[in-house]
Image (cartoon, rainbow, N blue to C red):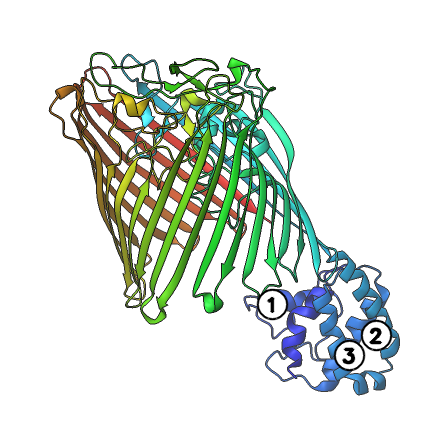
């Protein structure tokens, strides 16, 4: 038994609760020695005494009698103290020492039985205290944008085209605090809660909403749960501050069951069925969380392979009708992680006012479909539907209360584990009703999607993926508006959704009215210090954007505008990219990426012809100046040129930046960033702008 290993941290920790007094070092302990402070602390508390000649003799081996004497002094102090200052693990170590040194302690006159009873009582108290643990974080971001120029004739704020976020002039500071509690109810059952506090201390809220700390769900303007408007606050800059109970949870370990009420993220629900709203906040997760109830668990025990999830959530929306979703997943995981099969179902619904009655202010306005000709051949934001008793369809610019049932099945299996050869397949469908009150519409529509993929990892570090996907224009047409639609950004490389709206599935990776191939490959070598990646995609329209197609109930097509003056041409979107990265022995890290995209629709009529090309170059470097400080630099160059019909586009944005990361302690980190954004609109004069963006960030975890 290594007594020194047991006592090194344990005895020192157990003495910290008692008062200390100043004590000089022993004559043979150098002040610069790594253990000098610990020796001084233990000597000051009377735990160690040294030798009669005033030396410590730290290199000399300790005898069992000397160890017993030291433990006896600790136990005496422990007996006199009434504080539970030790952990259960430390008390267990003390008990093991007492048992191991029982003969020597008895010879020294130490009553081990009484001390064992005392430590047993302390252990019970400590165990009770350790049933409740706490954790938390504090996160603050300050942003200042200094913008010169504006977008010609629009009255809108400039945009950072590399991120798609609005560059509103001004400053803002946001703060978020999180406090979590874990409670061990029994060996099998635990519970907890998370409390969140959020504040906009100064400046303009929409700057904080795009560039600051991500607000909790229940006080976030993107979830429609904030009571403040999406523009600058009052002249005195009074802060918006709110504290919320973000979520509570209950868990049963043997069955793997976990119940969450409040903010949550689905564990099993597939994103091609239900993914929620894209998060406009640059610092937050890519998608907004859900808010409601979620339960996950296993059927037949953790080893059975059967797992389930049931959820209910309230979704963001501009409509006065509540937007609800509820559904579930049942999955089976094959042995040895060789594969999985899952079925999903979800129902989305606007809350109705009453049968046969409606409030038009609560309906969802249909998004406008672009038209490049002199005038759209039909109204650009209409679906054709029949009113009750009408024989001919009428163009409607609104939908709601909506209802949609979505379902899907997916499976993946590893055929050749040694080569990482996997196959996966997905199929899903949706049944959509644009008006459950049957006031504007009597019709419903259905749509489908499927995806087949192959994966291969023939050698260590190499991963290759190839897939084919097809998504109908009428798949998942249940659309909702953000509460702050006028400021919703544009996401590059191209907008695969209507600005200011979101669908329920992952409409970024699975855009509507597209079919085609995608490829992605990556290779890491040189002990993973060198990285190469490449990607390619070729997606074409399934249905041409004819006036008839645009007006079909449930049609979704956000890129290719309505064909003017006839024609049935289909558009396509192609893209490829390549990236390399290397980490040098010095810690210097280099990453370079290039992406190219083509948006094309060749048409005989000039008003319908589209040809847009985008090139994006990005360089990122980082270097550790000292152990806790890292210097970063980046440069992004974006060009976007071509034409949509008769409208020309030729823009360029240069964005150099520099940053500094400082890890003050294990729990406290700072980051400082500066970016210069230089936007040029070459097709039109007077539309250039530039911006200086300053950002400071601090994180504290405990």
Mark 2 in CB contact with mark 1 (< 8 angstroms): no
Q: Secondary structure at mark 3?
A: helix
Instruction: Give the vertical position of 51 relative to 656 (above or below).
Output: below
User: Residue 102, located in which quarter of the rendered image?
Assistant: bottom right
Q: Is residue 70 visible?
A: no
Residue 220 spot, x, y in % from top left: 54, 30
Instruction: Give the vertical position of 76 relative to 214 (above or below).
Output: below
Mark 3 in CB contact with mark 2 (< 8 angstroms): yes
Q: CA distance from mark 3 to mark 1?
A: 27 Å
First in sequence: mark 3 vs mark 1: 1
Task: Give the residue pinned by disc 1.
Answer: 36
Count neighbours of disc 1 (C-alpha within 10 A) and say few if under 14, some if 14 to 19, many if 20 or more: some
Q: Is residue 542 visible?
A: yes
Instruction: Give the vertical position of 256 relative to 518 (above or below).
Output: below
Classify residue 678 as left or right of residue 22. Answer: left
* Depth order, front residue of 337/152: 337
Q: Residue at x 28, y 21 (%)?
A: 370
First in sequence: mark 3 vs mark 2: 3
Classify residue 233 as left or right of residue 381. Answer: right
Q: CA distance from mark 2 to mark 1?
A: 32 Å
Task: Give the residue pinned by disc 3.
Answer: 98
Q: Residue at x 42, y 52 (%)?
A: 410
* Depth order, front residue of 6/646: 646
Residue 344 spot, x, y in % from top left: 49, 47
Q: Residue at x 81, y 64 (%)?
A: 124
**Can you tell which of label 2 and label 1 is closer to the viewer?**
2
First in sequence: mark 2 vs mark 1: 1
Q: Residue at x 70, y 77 (%)?
A: 50
Task: Give the residue pinned by disc 2.
Answer: 116
Residue 151 spot, x, y in % from top left: 29, 17
Classify residue 413 as left or right of residue 295. Answer: left
User: Residue 539, located in which quarter of the rendered image?
Assistant: top left
């Amino acid at each position: 038994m290594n007594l020194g290993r047991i006592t090194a941290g344990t005895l020192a920790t157990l003495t910290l609760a008692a008062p200390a007094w100043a004590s000089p070092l022993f004559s043979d302990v150098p002040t610069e020695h790594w253990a000098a402070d610990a020796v001084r602390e233990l000597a000051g508390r009377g735990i160690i005494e040294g030798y009669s000649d005033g030396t410590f003799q730290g290199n000399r081996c300790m005898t069992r009698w000397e160890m017993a004497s030291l433990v006896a002094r600790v136990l005496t102090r422990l007996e006199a103290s009434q504080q539970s200052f030790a952990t259960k693990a430390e008390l267990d170590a003390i008990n093991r020492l007492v048992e191991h040194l029982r003969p020597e302690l008895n010879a020294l006159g130490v009553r081990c039985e009484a001390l064992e009873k005392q430590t047993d009582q302390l252990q019970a108290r400590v165990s009770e205290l350790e049933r409740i643990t706490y954790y938390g974080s504090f996160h603050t971001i300050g942003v200042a944008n200094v913008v010169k120029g504006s977008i010609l004739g629009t009255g809108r704020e400039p945009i950072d085209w590399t991120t798609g976020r609005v560059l509103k002039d001004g400053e803002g500071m946001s703060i978020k605090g999180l406090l979590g509690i874990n409670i061990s109810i029994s060996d099998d059952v635990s519970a907890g809660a998370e409390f969140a506090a959020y504040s906009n201390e100064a400046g303009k809220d929409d700057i904080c909403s795009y560039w600051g700390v991500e607000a909790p769900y229940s006080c976030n303007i993107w979830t429609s749960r904030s009571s403040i408007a999406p523009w600058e606050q009052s002249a005195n800059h009074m802060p918006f501050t709110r504290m919320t109970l973000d979520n509570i949870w209950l868990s049963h370990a043997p069955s793997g069951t976990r119940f969450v009420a409040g903010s949550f993220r689905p564990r099993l629900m597939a994103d091609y069925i239900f993914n929620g709203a894209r998060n406009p906040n640059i610092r937050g997760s890519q998608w907004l969380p859900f808010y409601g109830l979620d339960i996950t668990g296993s059927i037949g025990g953790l080893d059975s392979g059967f797992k389930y999830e049931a959820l209910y959530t309230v979704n963001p929306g501009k409509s006065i009708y509540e937007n609800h979703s509820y559904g579930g997943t049942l999955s089976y995981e094959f042995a040895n992680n060789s594969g999985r099969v899952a079925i999903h179902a979800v129902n989305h619904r606007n809350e109705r006012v009453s049968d046969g009655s409606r409030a038009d202010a609560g309906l969802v306005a249909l998004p406008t479909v672009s038209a490049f000709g002199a005038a759209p051949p039909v109204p650009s934001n209409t679906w054709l539907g029949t009113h009750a008793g009408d024989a001919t369809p009428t163009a409607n610019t609104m939908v709601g209360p909506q209802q949609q049932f979505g379902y899907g099945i997916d499976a993946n299996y590893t055929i050749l584990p040694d080569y990482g050869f996997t196959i996966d397949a997905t199929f899903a469908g949706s049944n959509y009703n644009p008006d459950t009150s049957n006031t504007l519409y009597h019709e419903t529509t259905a749509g489908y999607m499927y995806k087949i993929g192959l994966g291969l990892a023939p050698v260590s570090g190499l991963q290759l993926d190839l897939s084919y996907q097809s998504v109908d224009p009428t798949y998942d047409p249940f659309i909702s508006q953000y509460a702050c639609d006028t400021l919703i950004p544009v996401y590059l490389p191209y907008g695969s959704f209507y600005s200011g709206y979101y669908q329920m599935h992952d409409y970024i990776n699975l855009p509507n009215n597209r079919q085609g191939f995608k490829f992605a490959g990556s290779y890491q070598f040189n002990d993973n210090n060198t990285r190469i990646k490449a990607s390619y995609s070729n997606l074409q329209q399934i249905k041409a954007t004819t006036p008839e197609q645009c007006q079909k109930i449930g049609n979704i097509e956000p890129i290719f505008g309505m064909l003017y003056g006839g024609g049935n041409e289909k558009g396509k979107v192609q893209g490829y990219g390549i990236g390399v990265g290397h980490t040098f022995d010095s810690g210097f890290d280099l990453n370079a990426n290039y992406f190219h995209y083509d948006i094309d629709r060749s048409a005989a009529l000039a008003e319908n012809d589209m040809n847009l090309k985008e090139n994006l170059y990005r360089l990122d470097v980082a270097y550790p100046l000292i152990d806790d400080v890292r210097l970063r630099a980046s440069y992004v160059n974006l060009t976007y040129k071509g034409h949509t019909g008769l409208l020309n586009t030729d823009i360029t944005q240069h964005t150099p930046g520099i940053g500094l990361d400082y890890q003050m302690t294990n729990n406290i980190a700072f980051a400082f960033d500066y970016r210069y954004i230089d936007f040029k609109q070459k097709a039109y004069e007077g539309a250039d702008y530039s911006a200086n963006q300053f950002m400071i960030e601090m994180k504290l975890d405990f």
